[in-house]
Image (spheres, grey):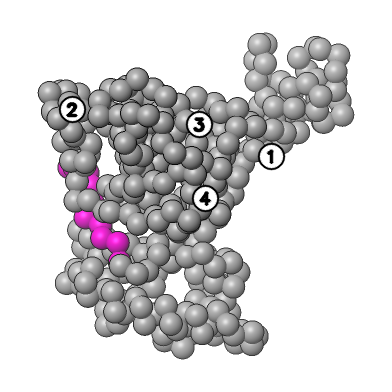
Amino acid sequence: MAKKRRPQTSRNKAATFSGGEVPEVGAREPCPCGSGRRYKACHGRAAAQAVTELVRRPFEGLPAECDWVALRELVPAATVPLTLREPLPEGVPAVTLATVLPMAWPGLRRESGEVLLGLQNDTPSGDLSRDLADVLRRALSAEPGTPVAAERPDPDGPRLQDLLDPNGPFVPEVHEGFEFWVDEADQSNSEVAASLERANSAAIPTVRLPGLEGAYWCEASEKNHLRWVMPHDEERLLDALGRLHASGASSLGEDTRLVGSFRAHGLMVPVWDLPSTMGAADCEKPAVEFQTRLAEALASTAPLSAEERKARSGFTNRQITLS
């Protein structure tokens, strides 16, 4: 998963210069580096950029935004064929998004010419979409058989929304393991084989529920779970979940429970505990029925009752931010 970025401010007690840490300084005060310029026009400029470049919803505007978030944060092994706006360069037969690549490479140009783009990597800027677009562009022109490292992108460079066809399909294929890493050229690579073995041993069995964008069942040691990335406005969604929970309509059936949520890339991800006997196929119908109840609750404009407010507050307190 991506590391959380901690935006700096113009009043930064730990700004680092060649002389070490400097004391707190205001934006209009002289810069502690001794340049004679105001802090905001000198080293404060980088601090301001760190704040403004952070994009809360990097996948907004892409087809299936909820699945992009799920593949970035929740799903161990999955691939998706990508369709670009422009024709593929000569010698590139396909472009494929992958949750993870061998040795955590951000990108890879296979010997066959196919380009793989890794989604679950640390990124050098606050705009994940621009970072990924930069890797993709460089992978398209890389030599076959070459991994592509992450670099800080041009701040005016394209984002994924500029490179990908907005009308192209986006249907993830979830895999049991990472064998999709290996083609004929990789079979003799001992580093890739070792990385594959480590990744497979850590992968949690996961299944995408068909017809429900962003909904993924996963198997855990004691309980199974449904983790569902939802596109709705967070405040409206919390209200709706509070209404459903207070009326006893938030579960997915017997021995299931809506236990809380994640927040990832600007979207909420409600999480249900499921009994270990409830497989992915068993989860599909209850999830579709819940989606209908949720739509009705989202449409309500009535003030929340005391019980509904209490339920909403409980969900808010149990929310964890992933990114």
Contact (Cβ within 8 Å) of mark 4 with mark 1: no
The span from disc 3 to disc 1 (Cα, nearest Å) is 19 Å
Residue that lies at the very extreme toward the left in this rendered image: 188
Count residues near mark 2 (Cα–Cα under 10 Å), then give few for <14, some for 14-19, many for 20+. some
The residue at 45%/43% (across/down) is: 84
Along the horizontal axis of the image, is 48 left or right of 73?
A: right
The amino acid type found where label 1 is placed reads Thr
Task: Magenta stretch: give its range.
Answer: 200-209
Q: In the picture provided, is 64 more to the left or to the right than 233?
A: left
- Distance from disc 4 to disc 1, alpha carbons, whole Å, reads 17 Å
Numbered tag placed on residue 186 in the rendering: 2
Q: CA distance from mark 3 to mark 4?
A: 15 Å
Sequence-wise, the earlier of marks 3 and 4 is 4
Instruction: Identify the residue under disc 4.
Output: 59
**Residue 50, placed above or below residue 310:** above
Indicate which disc, 3 or 1, sits on the residue closer to the N terminus: 1
Question: In this rendering, does residue 39 appear at all?
Answer: yes
Residue 269, disc: none
Choose the circle earlier in sequence order: 4 or 1. Answer: 1
Residue at disc 4, secondary structure? loop
Report the amino acid beneath label 4: Phe
| Residues packed near mark 3 inside 10 Å, few (<14), some (14 to 19) or many (20 plus) | many
Residue at x-position 41% and y-position 31% = 89
Residue 224, position as x, y percentages in the image: 25, 65
Q: Which residue is mark 3?
A: 134
Q: Amino acid at mark 2?
A: Asp
- Which residue bears the numbered disc 1? 52
Image quadrant holding the N terminus, namely top left
Picture residue at 18% right of the left edge, 27% below the top: 186
